[in-house]
Amino acid sequence: MHYLEFEKPLLEMTERITALRTALGKGEVGAEKDMEKEVARLTVKQARVARLLYRNLDAAQKVQVARHPGRPQGDDYISALLKDFVPLAGDRRFGEDKAILAGIGLWQGTHKVAVVATRKGKTTTQRLERNFGMPKPEGYRTAMRVFDLANRFGLPIITLVDTPGAYPGIEAEERGQAEAIAASMSKLLDVNVPVITIITGEGGSGGALALAVADEVLMLEHAVYSVISPEGCAAILWKEANKETIPQAASALKLTAQDLEKLGLIDGLIKEPVGGAHRDESLTITRVGDTVSRTLLRLKGKSSKENRRKKFLALGHG
Amino acid sequence: MSWLTNFSKPKISTRKKRGVSASVWAKCPACGDLIYDQDLVPNLYVCGACGHHLRWPLKERLAAWFDKGLYTEIPVPHMPDDPLQFKDRKRYKDRLKEARKATGREDAFVVASGEVGGNPCVVVALDFDFMAGSMSRAVGEAVVVAAQAAQAAKTPLLAVTASGGARMQESVFSLMQMARTTAALADLREAGVPYIVMLADPTTGGVTASFAMLGDVTLAEPGALIGFAGPRVIAQTIGGTLPEGFQRAEYLKEHGMVDAVVARGAQKTTIARLISLLG
């Protein structure tokens, strides 16, 4: 497991536990009982420390957790939560974007839905071909095609968002990155089926919002959602991005799920396992699955484009 | 309260010498030719030597577009300032104060109604001189108010964009203006009211990725920088140099992203035609 800087105490304890276990395994005579006791003590202590650490994360630490490479990703949610999943690829205009996984299937085996997820990738090859989860215009246009399809056949739309932002590159600009984002938002305000968004990790600016104009926008407990990365914000407003300015920017941006819920800019939180989503992938996925299922039932027959437009017209107003 | 904290700074206003010693000659940033100050307004801020379009002050633009320079400003409800009490090296409140003093505007926009070539329309224009035309809640509100005014009056809406993107100091409040403005335009579109956009230099970030790219017709000023990501960010990401003319209006047209690049001299006529044909 990859340990974040502030998780150092946890890493140290893991190392001690491992060392003790190795020693126990070798059958070194004498102190077995004491060693076993110590392992048990450390394990309990580690859980407590994890709970304490994660209860008081500051904004900059939340950003690190939200970007943790071990967090469950779009693919993980889809393969665990969707039965009979049929992937739908390509924008019919230019190409396929590997940073987007879209398709239809049965959510938790029950609800017919259309799903669009961003994908960061886990191996280096995946990360490169998916541009580290930064969609290109063809990705947003693929999403729009699936939104359309969902609308025509009455399938609720679920989007799973975890992206640093839309891809800032030459081809992306040439093919109309800005237009694709604007049109995707517009499409989500045109459909007459329920739309649910879960920000599972990073909600990176317009690139995230393009897929997050939903009746219900929920965030995982340690996810972040921001108009700009703390690094970018520090570089511009503090004139330099460094160890001091980045945390200041992160905190000033009010980008944590807790802040955004308080500000009324999102609709709710989904609790993560103790020590973050990366410590218990399947529990995280189950919680997301259950929350979405409940929300689907609640929104049934109650969502319309008019309501969604009203919601966003009023959002962040007062 | 001690005398130290009770002490208020003396308010001595120092008059800026602008206007007296300020250059009578402007220099064209493209060809370096000297342009006589007094020629700028009648020439619509276009360099006589090379045709370069300098940034056109909003007041001049509106005066040139509206018939006889007449228009009525539509009031936009005031949004509470500084929703996050944001402070970087400076307090956002202070930045706002400075921008208001420098521009005489409440925020980076004007909403107005009037006639262009005899055709009534509503205009929402961004002012780049006010914190780089960045999208605050107030700017979002202006677009919404303009769209709703156009919809109520069934007169075409015209947007002029010039913006560095998000107002970072308003963070996610700023981000949400992308969705807000898009929602207002979705209603306008359904009401069958035409929406025309003029992309001015520069239009980037969240403004481009929302109401600037949702026009029924999208026009651009010659040479205007238009994009989602800024050129510096892109160069950094790809670790290389950018193609010639990248993200300029003409480049966007070549790539199918705008309907026409319209020179200043022809803008009023083009807008009037579009409004009368679609309206």
Image (cartoon, coloured by chain):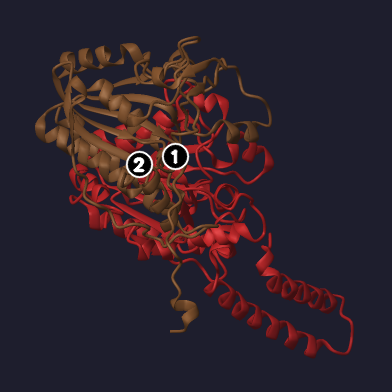
Chain colours: A red, B brown
Whether discs 1 and 2 lie on one chain: the answer is yes
In contact (CB < 8 Å): disc 1 and disc 2: yes
Q: Position of residue A255 (x, y in %)?
A: 47, 58
Q: Which residue is mark 2?
A: B108
Q: Which residue is mark 1?
A: B132
> To which quarter of the image does residue A7 belong?
bottom right
Q: Residue at x 48, y 38 (%)?
A: A101
Q: CA distance from mark 1 to mark 2?
A: 8 Å
Q: Position of residue B87 (x, y in %)?
A: 49, 60
For residue A186, the mark is: none
> To which quarter of the image does residue B115 belong?
top left
Above-or-below relation of A75 to B63: below
**Residue A19 at least partly seen:** yes
Q: Amino acid at mark 1?
A: Ala
Q: Amino acid at mark 2?
A: Ala
Q: Closer to the N terminus: mark 1 or mark 2?
A: 2
Which of the two residues, A193 or A31, is positioned nearer the viewer here?
Answer: A193
Q: Residue at x 51, y 57 (%)?
A: B90
Above-or-below relation of B277 to A253: above
